[in-house]
Image (cartoon, rainbow, N blue to C red):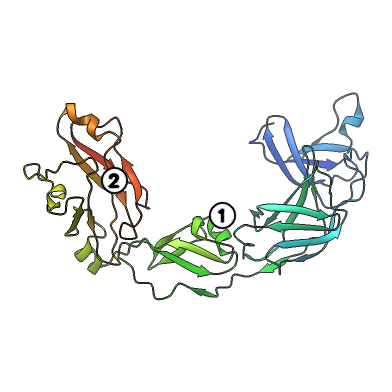
Amino acid sequence: MGSATTGFDLVDASTGSSICQSIKIPSYGVVECTTIASEIAEGTNIEAKLSATTYGCAGADATLCQYKQLSTGAYPAVTATDISSGSMVFTGTNFFTATTYEARTTYCGIYADTVSVDSATQVTATWTLGIPPCGTAKPVLTFNTTELLDYASGVADVVNNLTIASSSAGLSISWAGGEQLQIQSAGLASLLKEDPSINNITVCENLCAFSEADSTSAHGSCTLPEVSTSYSDTNYGIQTSHQLDSGVYISHHASKDPAPMFDGDLLIQFTAAGADSWFGMKFKTGYVAVLDKVKYFVPGENLKSFYINNTVLQGSNDDWATAVDIYTAPDTVSSGWNYVNFEDPAT
């Protein structure tokens, strides 16, 4: 019996009723049974059932096939659940406070980031990005050890509907996108993080990529996509790659035009000595550049060492008050043209 086995169950030998809420076979010969939320008397004889055939205890010791309760005492029970504080607070009885138990909570299939057992009558579950607003669903509260997984009984459905208070308004951005869109909705970010293929934001039918770093429990944030229209394609080449040329160039040398650094013509050169030479181009306010490939020329094998770790490509979103390194020439550069491909949407 292996992980591909189907139709397997564990049943009460006297009634033929299943004692398992769910069955899992993680590996050959190993069965994990989550018992039903009903009392099973200690010593109940258990049989294995495969499809329509049942199998009794094959060994000489029949007690090996009897139900044995490994934990003693009353089981945890939930009497009330409250989400008004921004966390999910369970009130009840017999919650396990011993350090040998780890409390876990899921709501609509999403695990809470932290679950604290405040006392034998209260447990608090917190999602860093907010309680998922998945409508009406029943939370699951368990207390786990290395051998046991005890479910708290009495948990009722919790209603937490998706509500949007507001969103970023008046954004004026480039056709190439790249700006952050915020939607003020408690817990929305938890849904977007869990499964972006199902829970996502689209703008003009284009995916707005979820940004966890820019999201909080109060709002979800995504990076606005490029928008391809006949106008943006014709005038800005949104769907096509072309040589980047802003027409406004900057460099460390105030008296020389740095444009030849970007024209792709090796016969027209820019010559300026300096240990800290730098060159770049600026874009009109509100416009951004999206890089998919950069090429640079190393004029000879004996000059490679001047480029290694010294040629750095940077980008800035605040008029060069600060800059971010997005490429540094490695020790694998070759003489002649070197090509760098960018696949990260952030660049």
Q: Which mark is residue 194?
A: 1
Residue 40, above or below 134: above
Instruction: Name the one closer to the observer, 304 or 153.
Output: 304
The 10 Å Cα crowd at callout 2, few under 14, some 14 to 19, many 20 or more, is some
In the picture shown, does residue 73 fall above or below 53?
Answer: below
For marks 1 and 2, the one nearer the N-term is: 1
- Distance from disc 1 to disc 2, alpha carbons, whole Å, reads 34 Å
Q: Residue at x 56, y 54 (%)?
A: 194
The residue that disc 2 covers is 313
* Relative vertical location of residue 332 with respect to residue 159 in this rendering, above or below: above
Label pair 1/2, CB-CB below 8 angstroms:
no
Q: Residue 177 appears at what percent x and percent y?
A: 34, 62
Q: Is residue 216 left or right of residue 72?
A: left
Q: Is residue 58 left or right of residue 22?
A: right
Q: In the picture, residue 13 is in which quadrant?
A: top right
Question: In front: 201, or 251?
Answer: 251
The secondary element bearing badge 2 is classed as strand
Quarter placement of the N terminus: top right
> Relative to residue 202, is residue 41 drawn left or right?
right
Q: What type is the residue that disc 1 sits on?
A: Glu
